[in-house]
């Protein structure tokens, strides 16, 4: 629908300019009549362009909200109802402890790394 409104607005602008040319220049009304017709057609289409932009933004936000709802339902199904209350969070295949100063063990090479480090010192695995 937004695309149809945009096409219609462009058509009205084109018709306004063409009618301005016909009435203003060909019909003997003069250059100012041409500018009046063209200006009125452009100004009358500005609200349509605004409505089209707003509807496109609403569609985009609706799609993003739907994606976030799907992600939230997948996360809730996989982690339980309240994943923050778990003592350890699962990221990828490596459990991560939320406590500060703790260490994590790389699942690839069994290297013990500090919790502040996101990659393994030995093999470069990203947790």
Image (tube, helix red, strand yellow):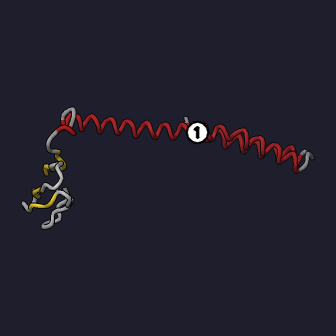
Q: Is residue 90 above or below residue 127?
A: above
Residue at the far front in the pictured view: 101
Q: Is residue 121 left or right of residue 19?
A: left
Q: Is residue 52 left or right of residue 82?
A: right
Q: Is residue 80 above or below residue 13?
A: above
Number of numbered discs visible in the structure rendering: 1
Residue lying at the far bottom in this picture: please name it.
Answer: 122
On screen, 122 above or below 1? below
- Locate residue 18, reporting x and y percent: 78, 45
Instruction: Kindly indicate the quadrant of the structure image that contains residue 76.
Output: top left
Give the residue number, with chain letter if any, for mark 1: 52
Q: Is residue 21 above or below residue 106?
A: above
Rendered-image quadrant of the C terminus: bottom left
Task: Locate residue 3: give its quadrant.
Answer: top right
- The x, y position of residue 26, in whole percent, is 88, 48
Across and down, in percent, residue 101 comes to 15, 56
Name the element at disc 1: helix
Between 31 and 95, the residue placed more toward the observer is: 95
Q: Return the residue found at the far right.
A: 28
Figure quadrant of residue 52: top right
Residue under the image location 55 percent in, 38 percent down = 54
Q: What's the residue at 93%, 47% (across, down)?
A: 28
Quadrant for the N terminus in the image: top right
Q: Residue furthest left?
A: 110
Q: Choose between 53 and 111: the one closer to the eye.
A: 111
The residue located at (84%, 45%) in the rendering is: 22
- Circle 1 residues within 10 Å: few <14, some 14–19, many ≥20: some
Does residue 124 appear left or right of residue 109 in this picture?
Answer: right
Percent x, y of residue 86: 16, 39
């Amino acid at each position: 629908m937004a695309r149809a409104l945009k096409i219609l607005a462009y058509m009205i602008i084109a018709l306004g300019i063409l009618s301005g040319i016909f009435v203003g220049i060909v019909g003997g009304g003069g250059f100012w009549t041409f500018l009046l017709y063209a200006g009125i057609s452009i100004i009358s289409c500005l609200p349509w362009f605004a409505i089209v932009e707003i509807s496109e933004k609403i569609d985009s936000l609706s799609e993003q909200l739907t994606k976030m709802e799907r992600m939230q339902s997948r996360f809730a199904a996989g982690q339980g109802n309240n994943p923050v209350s778990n003592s350890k969070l699962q990221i990828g295949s490596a459990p991560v402890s939320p406590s500060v100063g703790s260490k994590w063990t790389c699942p690839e090479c069994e290297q013990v790394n500090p919790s502040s480090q996101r990659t393994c010192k030995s093999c470069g695995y990203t947790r």
